[in-house]
Structure formats: structure tokens, C-alpha cells
């Protein structure tokens, strides 16, 4: 019930953010029910019906192997959700642990945070590329790499917030009542970090999509047989003049999804941190 | 042997590679059923002394450089983490200065009390909850069986302070350290909180260390008083003696700066100057730049602690020449 009220206040008066949220719900439904929604097998090749224009029965047309673009797009939603949640989980777990532990055990923290600083000095995409060349192309490795890239920023944010919380009197009070390190970190400090973590999660989810699409486009992300929006762009880019719909649909899906996630992230952040509220009023 | 014995406690702060002493040679002891008051201006080392006793000076910048603290025969400075944790919140507890921030904002107050109880005692959740309700009614929170599920932000400052007290008392501690427990509260609530602490002392025989800069509070509640100035105890005596036969000019100054309600004076006396900062090198008595009785001797030699009267020690070259 509390979460319901929270969502109501977060999205009240924000029509765009609400639309964004609905779009994300649609993506999730598509991902969950992909076999029911997709009219064709996304991997089925049809040499006769190559590069068909959008129409019936191929709503989004077909690609250069004659595969149904609409079905591939629906299955691509599945990848979007998997990559997003996977990267968020890796980034929050790794980054959160590093940040919290660094802030709590200051000596170890000095070392860990300097390592994080070094990693942050590389542009996100460059670091992802460097890491992915060491690993094989697979869904899991893509998630891992993107998660590691965004673990650095998460670590930095949580480091600051934990540092602040650590100085709060209620932490001293917990020490005084005999609480151990583990209990202080995870029972007393962590619950106070839930809202920044939630906001961070929504932004990582969005950025992970762009990152994954970029990796796919460069041919270093998901294996080529996996239907993902990034892979679709990458494979069909040579047909941009003959069959532009092959690029327009997946491109549009990526843009819409990332934009929606950013809108939702903004709405969540504003409802948690009211200082930003007036910056983009009504959006 | 007293319950809490602090001997020659030395605490230093590390700044720019130097160790600056902030607490020097502080000694006192507290018995069961006794209340010790520690008074002094801000920055004279009262709170640091309390934090040292509770083992909260874990950082690298502030550290204990000498002396020892014994609680019930155990040396607190050499205890292992585990042993220390089993004493903290159980046999000794602390009440903090800021009731607004001493409770974790994301947990219900009942859960926070229950956590403390179950940390130290074998109890089921239900038993601990009953105990929490009982404690809340002990500290006179109205409607305790409902308030136990309140979040800290749903309570007023005075109520939160009382929740803190309830939590501190949850395991019947033998020693209670209260670091300015009433500073953030208004006068009526202040009185309630102090009455409550006195009441609990008579009931359970708890030893209390009360840190305050309010001499009124000290005179009302404490059996003995230690006056601190710039990291040293300058005068220590039983409360009634301190107020009638005070022997240190600093104590005189503190007493003079209390406004008297029914007198006709327009001008409130103050101690001139301020507490010297740590960086200022001082020879002789730390109080001499502000003292009315200052002589050349004060600027060159540090007065030793002398017994002015039985049970009344003073650190001043001119003890006894101060107008009472």
C-alpha cells in the first residue's frame, strides 16, 4: 500500500513520466509473453521473403534473411529486460559493497576508492570494450561488463552517502549498544540508502541499454544469433538505403525505452529528493 | 573499588602530523548509586572523555594516548572487540546529546529497543516486545503499546530523548553515561528527563556520569562534580562543597555567569576571553590569560593538583584565595 502511494506521488502531474512508465510496463509484458505475442519464430529464415516492406503479415517487414522484424523486436524486449536487470544487479551489488565497505573501513577504503577512481578515468564505452575483449561474447559476459562499468559510479555515490551516515549519532548509538560491524553496515546503514539506490538503479537500467546497444553495434556485445535491438541495428545497417525500416524500428525502440527509463528515473529522484522538483516542472 | 575508575586519561588529536593533547591527566571515579557531573565550556574535553569511556574513539585522528579506564574491575582499553560489545548497551549505556538524530530514521522505535534487548539477552521477539512496551511506559511515553510501532519522525524531541533513555535502560545497565542529555530540550521536558533519570537511579542503583554545561542541572542532580578546563580537571568536589567553598577562579567565573532571577543587576558577569584553541602553545596554567588573580607564577608554572580540603581537589596556585 505504501509503495502504491509512493508511486502515486512520484507520478502525479507528470504526464510524460507516466507515459514512460506505461511504455516500460509494455516492454516488460512483451518480454514475459514474447512467445505468445510474436507471430513468427524470430530465428526462422525465409530466403524468398527477404527485405519485405512493413505490411501484413510482417508488421515491421523482414530482414535480409527473411526473418520477421516484429517477432525479433518482441524477443529483443526480452534481452532489454535481462540486460537491464542483470547490469543493475551487478552494479548495485559490486558498487554498493565497495562503496559501503570503503566508507566504513577507511584505510581499506582509501585503497579501494583510488582503484575506483582509476577505473572511472576511462570513458565507460572504452572500458566496456577493453573488458569484453578479454571475455567471450555471451549474454552473461555482456551483463558482467556493463555491470562493472556502472559499479564505479555506484561505488562513488554510496561511498559519499555511507560516509555521511557513518557520522550520524544513531550509528554511534548502535555501536554503544553493542552492535557489530556487519550489523551496523547492513542493518543500520543500508536501509537508509534504499532511496538513492532505487534512483541509481533506474538510471543504470537506462544507460545499460545504450551501452549494450553500442557493444552490439560494434559486434562485441551479445552473440549475433541472439535477437536484440542492438544486434538488429548492427546487422542491418548496410541495408539502410534499401530497407530503412530495418533500422528505424529497433532504433526507435531503443530511443523510446531509454527515454522512458530516464523519465521514470527523474520522477523517482524528484519525489525522493525534493530539491530538484522545480527544475523540470510538469515534465 | 569504584564501579568506574578513570586514571590519568590522555587523549590527543592528530593534526598536520602533530599530536595535540586535548585531554590530559583526567582522573575520577564513580560508585554504584552515585552521580558524577562533569562541567566546563565547549571544547574542554568533556564529551571526548565520555566517548573514550564508551570506546567510540576508534578513528585515526583522535586517540587515547595514556591512562586507563577500569569498569567493574575490567580494563576497558585492552578488551577485545567481542568482550567490549557484550558490555556495551548491556552493563554500560550512553544517552546522546542529539535526540533528533540518535535514532535510526528507517526503523520503528520498538524494533530498535528490541534489537538492543535481544543483542544481549536470550528473549523471544514477543518477550522483548513486551519489555520494550514496559520500558516505554517507564519513561512515561503515553500509550506505549501503540507508540512502540511509531517511527522516530512521528515523535517529538523530548519523546525521542525518552526513547533513547528507554533503550539505554533496556538491559538494566550498571553505568549510564549521559552526554548533555537535556541540552536540546526545553526546560519543562528537561526537568522531566532529569527527574526520570534520578527516579531510575533510586530504583536500580545505577551509577550516572552526567555531562553538562548547565550548573543548575548539575547542582540539582549530582553527588559530586568535576570541573574541566582545556582538557584538565581543575576542581573536583562533592556538590554541596563545590558550590559553597569553591577554590578555583574558573569555577567562580562559571557560577558568576549564571543569571540570578530575583536580583536587580543589569550586567551579567562573564569570563573574559575564550577557551584557547589547541594550536595555541600555553605555558603555565591554561586559565591564566583569562584569570583575574593571574600573577607571573601562573604564566610560567602549571599548578599541581592539591587537596584543598578532604575530598576536594583543586589545580590552582591560589586555591582558597578565591572569593566564595
Image: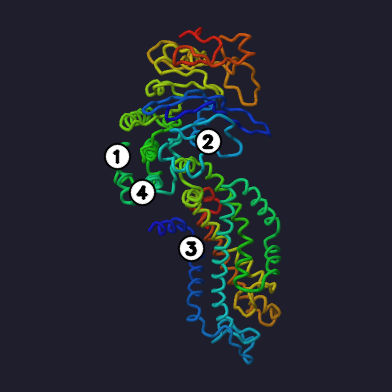
Q: Position of residue B194 (x, y in %)?
A: 36, 29
Q: CA distance from mark 3 to mark 4?
A: 50 Å
Tag 1, which secondary structure?
helix
Quadrant containing the N terminus of chain B is: top left
Question: Which mark's residue is nearer the viewer, 3 or 4?
Answer: 4
Chain letter of the residue carrying label 1: B
Q: CA distance from mark 4 to mark 1?
A: 22 Å
Q: Which residue is mark 4?
A: B122
Q: Which residue is mark 1?
A: B137
Tag 3, which secondary structure?
helix
Q: Which residue is mark 3?
A: A18
Chain letter of the residue carrying label 3: A
Q: Position of residue B134 (x, y in %)?
A: 30, 42
Chain letter of the residue carrying label 4: B
User: Badge 2, how many Cα within 10 Å: few under 14, some, many 20+?
Assistant: some
Quadrant containing the C terminus of chain B is: top left
Chain letter of the residue carrying label 2: B
Q: Are marks 1 and 3 on the same chain?
A: no
Q: Are marks 2 and 4 on the same chain?
A: yes
Tell me what residue is drawn at x 64 percent, y 13 percent. Answer: B300
Would you place residue B161 above or below residue A58 in this image? above
Would you place residue A8 above or below residue B195 in this image? below
Left or right: A54 as drawn, with respect to A118: left
Answer yes or no: do the residues labelled 1 and 3 have beta carbons within 8 Å? no
Q: CA distance from mark 1 to mark 2?
A: 36 Å
Left or right: A29 as drawn, with respect to B193: right
Tag 2, which secondary structure?
loop
User: Badge 1, how many Cα within 10 Å: few under 14, some, many 20+?
Assistant: some
Q: CA distance from mark 2 to mark 4?
A: 27 Å
Q: Which residue is mark 2?
A: B77
Amino acid at each position: 500500500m505504501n509503495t502504491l502511494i509512493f508511486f502515486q506521488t512520484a507520478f502525479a502531474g507528470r504526464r510524460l513520466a507516466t507515459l514512460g512508465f506505461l511504455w516500460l510496463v509494455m516492454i516488460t509484458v512483451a518480454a514475459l509473453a514474447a512467445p505468445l505475442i510474436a507471430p513468427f519464430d524470430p530465428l526462422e529464415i525465409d530466403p524468398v521473403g527477404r527485405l519485405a516492406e512493413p505490411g501484413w503479415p510482417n508488421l515491421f517487414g523482414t530482414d535480409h534473411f527473411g526473418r520477421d522484424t516484429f517477432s525479433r523486436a518482441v524477443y529483443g524486449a526480452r534481452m532489454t529486460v535481462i540486460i537491464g536487470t542483470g547490469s543493475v544487479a551487478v552494479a548495485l551489488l559490486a558498487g554498493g559493497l565497495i562503496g559501503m565497505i570503503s566508507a566504513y573501513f577507511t584505510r581499506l577504503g582509501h585503497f579501494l576508492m583510488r582503484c575506483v577512481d582509476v577505473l572511472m578515468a576511462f570513458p565507460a564505452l572504452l572500458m566496456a570494450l577493453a573488458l569484453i575483449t578479454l571475455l567471450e561474447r555471451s549474454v552473461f559476459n555482456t551483463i558482467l561488463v556493463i555491470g562493472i562499468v556502472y559499479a564505479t559510479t555506484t561505488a562513488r555515490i554510496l561511498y559519499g552517502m555511507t560516509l555521511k551516515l557513518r557520522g550520524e549519532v544513531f550509528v554511534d548509538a548502535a555501536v554503544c549498544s553493542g552492535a557489530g560491524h556487519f550489523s551496523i553496515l547492513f542493518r543500520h546503514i543500508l536501509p537508509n540508502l534504499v532511496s538513492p539506490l532505487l534512483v541509481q538503479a533506474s538510471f543504470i537500467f537506462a544507460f545499460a541499454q545504450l551501452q549494450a546497444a553500442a557493444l552490439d553495434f560494434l559486434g562485441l556485445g551479445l552473440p549475433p544469433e541472439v535477437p536484440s535491438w542492438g544486434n538488429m541495428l548492427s546487422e542491418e545497417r548496410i541495408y539502410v538505403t534499401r530497407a530503412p525500416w530495418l533500422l528505424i524500428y529497433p532504433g526507435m525502440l531503443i530511443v523510446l525505452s531509454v527515454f522512458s527509463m530516464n523519465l521514470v528515473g527523474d520522477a523517482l529522484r524528484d519525489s525522493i529528493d525534493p530539491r530538484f522538483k522545480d527544475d523540470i516542472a510538469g515534465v | 573499588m569504584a564501579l568506574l575508575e578513570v586514571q590519568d586519561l590522555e587523549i590527543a588529536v592528530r593534526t598536520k602530523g602533530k599530536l595535540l593533547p586535548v585531554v590530559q591527566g583526567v582522573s575520577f571515579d564513580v560508585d554504584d548509586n552515585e552521580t558524577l557531573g562533569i562541567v566546563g565550556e565547549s571544547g574542554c574535553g568533556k564529551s571526548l572523555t565520555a566517548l573514550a569511556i564508551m570506546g567510540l574513539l576508534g578513528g585515526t585522528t583522535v586517540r587515547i594516548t595514556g591512562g586507563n579506564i577500569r569498569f567493574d574491575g575490567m580494563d576497558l582499553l585492552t578488551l577485545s572487540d567481542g568482550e567490549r560489545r557484550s558490555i556495551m548497551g548491556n552493563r554500560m549505556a550512553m544517552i546522546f546529546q542529539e535526540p533528533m538524530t540518535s535514532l535510526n530514521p528507517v526503523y520503528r522505535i520498538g524494533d530498535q529497543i528490541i534489537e538492543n534487548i535481544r543483542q544481549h539477552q536470550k528473549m523471544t521477539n514477543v518477550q522483548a516486545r513486551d519489555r520494550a512496551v514496559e520500558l516505554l511506559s517507564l519513561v512515561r511515553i503515553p500509550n506505549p503499546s501503540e507508540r512502540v510501532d511509531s517511527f522516530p519522525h512521528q515523535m517529538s524531541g523530548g519523546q525521542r530523548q525518552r526513547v533513547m533513555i528507554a533503550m539505554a535502560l533496556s538491559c538494566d545497565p550498571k553505568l549510564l553515561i549521559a552526554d548533555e542529555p537535556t541540552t536540546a530540550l526545553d526546560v519543562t521536558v528537561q526537568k522531566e528527563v532529569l527527574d526520570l533519570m534520578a527516579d531510575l537511579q533510586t530504583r536500580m542503583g545505577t551509577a550516572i556520569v552526567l555531562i553538562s554545561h548547565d550548573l543548575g542541572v548539575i547542582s540539582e542532580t549530582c553527588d559530586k562534580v568535576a570541573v574541566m578546563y582545556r582538557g584538565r580537571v581543575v576542581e573536583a568536589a562533592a556538590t554541596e562543597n563545590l558550590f559553597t567553598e569553591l577554590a578555583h577562579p574558573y569555577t567562580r567565573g562559571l557560577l558568576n555567569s549564571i543569571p540570578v532571577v530575583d536580583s536587580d543587576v543589569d550586567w551579567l558577569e562573564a569570563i573574559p576571553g575564550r577557551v584557547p584553541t589547541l594550536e595555541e602553545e600555553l605555558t603555565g596554567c591554561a586559565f591564566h590569560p583569562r584569570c583575574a588573580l593571574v600573577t607571573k607564577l601562573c604564566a610560567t608554572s602549571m599548578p599541581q593538583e592539591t587537596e584543598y580540603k578532604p575530598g576536594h581537589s583543586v589545580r590552582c596556585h591560589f586555591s582558597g584565595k578565591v572569593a566564595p
